[in-house]
């Protein structure tokens, strides 16, 4: 994300980043040996870093899997005392023992008995904390977006590979049964050539503004400088702290929050990774509440495999949401917004121009699971268990999980490209050879 600050802030940024990197490699040297080999009967010892709203979901999910996967939350870590204490109480209830309470991730990384970290802190910290975790020999589950600064996402990905850690990225729909069945169908070629994917996910409301936590948080109850990580210092701001999704240095908003899920599914369904180019437009048209990030956003991404993706979100109107994979033989429609399990396959047959009633001739079917007799709901269920379960299985088998660090890096690149395009007003190009984003096509 772009930095609009002057040279002093830039210097501060560089020196803080350097300090952070130095700290992380010191940890790597001392802690690499901590990564223990898990035996089939060993209980996996977890620590959860970032115990906010998503953290509550993840704690609940892990509690459901605690016995069957033989895992225990033995530590929780949050800069903010209120959320830390809530997480201690919740996990004590879930696991029958109080977890250790940490304020700072550095203290978690120095422990020998914690095998893996769950990272559900704000967007700007994911890549940085992921890198620190894997350098200390821990496996990790990291929330999306995996990163929103290209160099940080690259460094995290490289560290995961260098240290052979098992990392699941929190795009959980990859593990849910309906998207898996739909993707399998797409792999049979049933759609014919797909030239366009359209994603429309809407919401009516001043999304991400007015969280109750914003009124509750006090600077003395947290560590604001640690929250900022490598961002230039600015005075404590409870709105940034709790409503980070609205502030461009911390999150790109709609791309980081929602498009990360949507484009990750497209990459997976279409066997694609990096856009060739991206453009974007949007603005603050619905909610003039001091937000920096767009409340109305449209991105267009062209893929080298030969298709275009249009991603659109409006917070000013909740017209029905959908994703459509548009092939020459059929359309796959995911009815509903993020996470909807309702998928329908609709045959392509002639054109409306020749026959206005053409829709009547199109065969269609819903994608149901074996034994499923009713249409699945269209709602989002952020508490599905499969993704976390898959990570636990992979931690034992040392196989790659459903949402790898490469998948996370790819969704991060797509989100960063549309974000750069939005703020700069210039089309962005991915240079695969140098892994850089430019505003000129790469020389071939
Ligand atoms: N996969 C999904 O469906 C899904 C759903 C919701 C949110 N999320 C992701 O979860 C992340 C968190 O969102 P949220 O709504 O829970 O935010 P939140 O503000 O409710 O919680 C974040 C917590 O992290 C803590 N924190 C911040 N920096 C920290 C640090 N460096 N070390 C330790 N603790 C730190 C904060 O004190 C806070 O308690 C976001 O990045 C979001 O994209 C994913």
Image (spheres, helix red, strand yellow):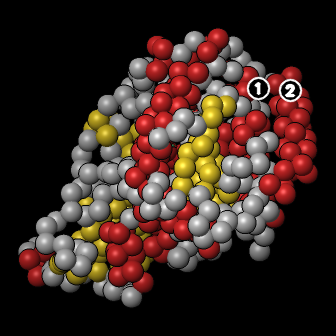
Find disc 1 in the rendering and name its residue: 232
User: Real-space Cα distance between discs 1 and 2?
Assistant: 6 Å
- In screen coordinates, is 426 left or right of 15? left
- In screen coordinates, is 441 left or right of 58? right
Q: Is residue 63 visible?
A: yes
Position of residue 360 relative to residue 203, above or below, is: below
- Image quadrant where residue 343 sits: bottom left
Query: Is disc 1 in contact with disc 2, using a CB cutoff of under 8 Å?
Result: yes
**Residue at horizontal 89%, vertical 35%?**
19
Query: In the image, residue 119 lies at what x, y percent?
Result: 60, 45
Question: As rendered, which of 288 and 374 lies closer to the eye?
Answer: 374
Query: In the image, residue 23 lies at what x, y percent?
Result: 87, 39
Q: Secondary structure at mark 2?
A: helix
On residue 12, which mark appears?
Answer: 2
On residue 416, which mark appears?
Answer: none
Placement of the C terminus among the 4 image quadrants? bottom right
Mark 2 sits near ligand 1, with its Cβ under 8 Å away:
no
Question: As rendered, which of 176 and 354 lies closer to the eye?
Answer: 176
Placement of the N terminus among the 4 image quadrants? top right
Mark 1 sits near ligand 1, with its Cβ under 8 Å away:
no
Query: In the image, residue 148 lies at what x, y percent?
Result: 64, 46
Position of residue 236 relative to residue 97, above or below, is: above
Q: Is residue 155 visible?
A: no
Q: Callout 2: few (<14), some (14-19), or many (20+) C-alpha neighbours within 10 Å?
A: some
Position of residue 154 relative to residue 288, above or below, is: below
Question: As rendered, which of 72 and 140 lies closer to the eye?
Answer: 72
**Residue at horizontal 15%, vertical 82%?**
363
């Amino acid at each position: 994300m772009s930095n609009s600050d002057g040279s002093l802030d830039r210097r501060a940024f560089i020196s803080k980043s350097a300090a952070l990197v130095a700290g992380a490699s010191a940890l790597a040297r001392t802690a690499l040996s901590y990564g223990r080999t898990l035996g089939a009967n060993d209980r996996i010892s977890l620590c959860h870093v970032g115990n906010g709203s998503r953290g509550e979901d993840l704690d609940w999910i892990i509690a459901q899997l605690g016995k069957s996967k033989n895992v225990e939350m033995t530590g929780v870590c949050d800069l903010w005392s209120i959320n830390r204490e809530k997480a201690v109480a919740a996990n004590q209830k879930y696991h029958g023992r109080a977890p250790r309470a940490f304020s700072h991730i550095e203290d978690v990384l120095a422990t020998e008995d914690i095998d893996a970290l769950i990272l559900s802190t704000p967007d700007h910290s994911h890549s940085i904390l992921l890198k620190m975790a894997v350098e200390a020999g821990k496996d990790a589950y990291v929330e999306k977006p995996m990163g929103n600064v290209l160099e940080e996402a690259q460094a995290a990905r490289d560290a995961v590979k260098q240290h052979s850690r098992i990392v699941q990225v929190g795009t959980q729909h990859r593990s849910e049964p309906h998207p898996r069945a739909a993707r399998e169908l797409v792999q049979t070629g049933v759609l014919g050539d797909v030239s366009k994917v359209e994603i429309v996910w809407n919401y009516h409301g001043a999304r991400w503004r007015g969280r109750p936590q914003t009124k509750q948080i006090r600077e003395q109850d947290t560590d604001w400088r640690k929250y900022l990580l490598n961002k230039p210092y600015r005075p404590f701001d409870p709105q940034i702290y709790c409503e980070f999704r609205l502030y461009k240095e911390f999150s790109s908003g709609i791309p980081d929050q929602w498009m990360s899920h949507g484009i990750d599914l497209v990459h997976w369904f279409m066997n694609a990774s990096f856009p060739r180019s991206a453009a974007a437009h949007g603005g603050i048209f619905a909610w003039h509440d001091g937000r920096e990030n767009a409340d109305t956003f449209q991105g267009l991404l062209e893929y080298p495999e030969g298709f275009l993706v249009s991603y659109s979100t409006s917070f000013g109107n909740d017209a029905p949401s959908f994703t459509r994979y548009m092939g020459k033989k059929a359309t796959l429609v995911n009815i509903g917004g993020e996470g909807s399990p309702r998928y329908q396959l609709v045959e392509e047959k002639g054109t409306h121009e020749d026959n206005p009633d053409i829709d009547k001739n199109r065969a269609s079917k819903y994608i149901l699971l074996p034994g499923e007799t009713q249409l699945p709901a269209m709602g989002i269920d952020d508490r599905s268990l499969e993704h976390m379960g898959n990570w636990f299985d992979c931690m034992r088998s040392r196989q790659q999980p459903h949402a790898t660090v490469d998948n996370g890096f790819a969704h991060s690149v797509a989100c960063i490209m549309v974000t750069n395009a939005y703020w700069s007003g210039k089309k962005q190009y991915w240079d695969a050879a140098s892994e850089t984003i430019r505003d000129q096509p790469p020389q071939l």
